Amino acid sequence: MKRAGLAVLLLLAGCAHGPARRGGPERVCVTAEGWSAVVPSDQLGTAKRALAEAQRKAVEAVTGVSVRARTRVEQAVSVEQKIWSDAEGRILSYEVLGEREEGGFHKTRIRAVVLKDSPQPGQTRPASLPGDPKVAVVVDTWAFPDRGAAERGVAQGLKEAGVKVGFGAADYVVSGEASVAPLDSGGLEGFVSYRARLAVELKDPAKDEVIAARNFEASAMDVSRPAAAGKALAQAGRLAGERLAADLRARLEE
């Protein structure tokens, strides 16, 4: 009984991103699954296409309208997924719940927080940074299969703070390394807990200057070890993104 209650709390926590700002559009937490035909010679691309399809379905489930997924890839290892409708992004954040191959398809299931109504200026996002600079994120994760978990978290944190995140040439770069390790899960009745550690730097590549260097930690638990570790990495990344966005804003407003 205790375990069931804890599971419910975890599910609710996974969808808790705070209320929309007063007068702003409603935020809805939804799960969706995307499929992509398996291409043996392009496993990474197959997984990315399935994720983009899951994001598209999440938005359609909330808005009831068709949208298009735009995926930008650089050097076949980095990807930025954005779901657009009415020229505005609707997905505030997402979490990969599971991936599998079945019947010749790669299937990815996600939980996403989606804006139900079309965002209006000033309602859902902080003001852009002075000059609207572009920030690239390169964070590696050691000893964990999903080496982009922390990187995606950093990117989400930056975006939610009003920072433009992209790939390739950028005005500023966030780089770093993350690690994750299990915690003592005694008394959690089947749940496991992991702690992630993340060290990041915000740099101005044109001046070869480090604007900020910070360390972050975050913990998470789940019935699955990979899920718990991934959640911890993503949370550490989001904390880093939010803080580095504030550091960059302060520098640009000096």
Image (tube, rainbow, N blue to C red):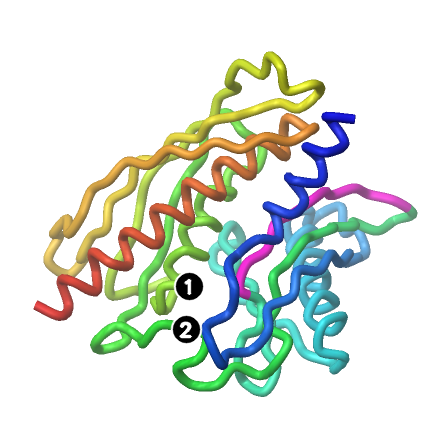
Q: Is residue 101 magenta?
A: yes
Locate residue 12, reporting x and y percent. 65, 47
**Residue position for label 2:** 125
Q: Residues within 10 Å of mark 2 (few under 14, many from 20)?
A: some
Q: Is residue 122 magenta?
A: no
Locate residue 184, reporting x and y percent. 53, 14
Q: Residues within 10 Å of mark 1 (few under 14, many from 20)?
A: some
Residue nearest the viewer, comparing 2 with 87:
2
Locate residue 83, reporting x and y percent. 60, 71
**Residue position for label 1:** 160
Q: Quadrant of residue 69?
A: bottom right
Q: CA distance from mark 2 to mark 1?
A: 7 Å
Give the residues in magenta: 92-102
User: Looking at the image, can residue 196 be seen?
Assistant: yes
The answer to whether 117 is drawn above or below residue 235 in the figure is below
Residue nearest the viewer, comparing 174 with 252:
252
